[in-house]
Image (cartoon, grey):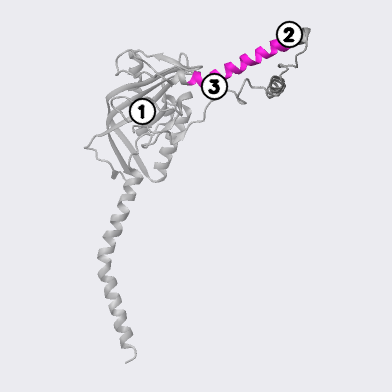
Amino acid sequence: MQNRPSASLSAVLALRVMTALPLAVPAAAMMAAPIVIAATAEARPGGGSSFGSRGSRSFSPPPSVSIAPRGATPFNRPAPMNPGFNPGYRPYGGFGSRPLLHGFVGGLLGAGLFGLLSGHGFFGGGFGLLSLLGTIIQLTLLFLIARWVFRRFFARQMAGASMPRGMAFGGNPVAGGATASSAPLSLQPQDFRSFESLLTQIQSAWSRGDTGALRQFTTPEMAANFNAQLSDLARRGLRNQVSDVRLEKGELSEAWSEPGAQYATVAMRYSLVDVTTDAGGRIVDGNPSVRDLVTEYWTFQRRPGGAWVLSAIQQAG
């Protein structure tokens, strides 16, 4: 008699568990489904991220255009700046790159300012050659200070005050404001044809998993990023294939030249069929009967006398 309540309680608990299982299993499946979709969504080249390099303008947003009025998103993985591309780069800043010169000039400047505050001039009010030499050094230092202040505070504002917009593909636009290390670049119709060709060639190489072709069409940094994405998909037993890529519209955001390289950032609106399959060929994301529409900012780079290659992808805001 003492064991009956316990047996009865066990039966009730078992009945409740069996009743809850049909509801719990679909609920768990529904919770897991979005995770699978999120892991494979936007598996096209770039994976919906923003990364790469725009040279000296890597940390400046490209000007917006009509097909992407909200501009581009910042880089998720910004490229390290290359000091060799910026003649204004100084590892120590200030007047030059020699710390010894800084100390010497700083000492003279400090002594001179103390003399001025004491009412004896920059070098104590001496006579003859020493006084003349002191006057020359004083004027030179004042000139260097004025020039440094102008370059530091006013030249950058004047350079960045105006940045003209680009034109649609097929014209002969000039876009991009001048900065201390860059100048506007004029593009020709063949340049835009190269951009459109690279769009389809890179997508095709991606679908084939052809890392050699990707290295040919992109900078080393972009090729490394693409290779990492392909390796991650392969590790999960997935394969992403994009097909029937069509450039719907392209607009130049800006184009400029730097020492040793030229750049062009273009807003690209293109459509494609984007499908991800598993190792057995079953579709886990995408629809082969539906075209996706994508808008991204692509930045292209070329060396003097070289061909254009892809150096950055940024998602439209």
- 155 in the magenta segment: yes
Region in magenta: 134-156
**Does residue 58 appear in this view?**
yes
Secondary structure beneath dot 2 equals: helix
Which mark lies nearer to you, 3 or 1? 3
Query: Which amino acid, mark 1?
Result: Tyr
The disc, 3 or 1, on the residue closer to the chain's N-terminal end is 3
- 240 in the magenta segment: no
Residue 152 - label: 3
- Relative to 35, residue 167 above or below: above
The residue identified by callout 1 is 297
Residue 175 quadrant: top left
Dot 2: within a 10 Å radius of its alpha carbon, few (fewer than 14), some, or many (20 or more) residues?
few
Query: Which amino acid, mark 3?
Result: Arg
Residue 1 horizontal/vertical position (percent): 31, 92
Give me the residue at 27% from left, 73% from top: 16
- Relative to 305, residue 300 above or below: below
Q: Quadrant of the C terminus?
A: top left
Residue 132 - label: 2
Residue 167 horizontal/vertical position (percent): 31, 18
In front: 91, or 229?
A: 91
In front: 307, or 72?
A: 72
Secondary structure beneath dot 1 equals: strand
Residue positioned most to the front? 119
- Relative to 186, residue 94 above or below: below
Callout count: 3
Which mark lies nearer to you, 3 or 2? 2
Give me the residue at 48% from left, 31% from top: 79
Question: Rounded to the nearest whole Å, what is the CA distance between mark 3 and mark 1?
Answer: 31 Å
Residue 289 quadrant: top left
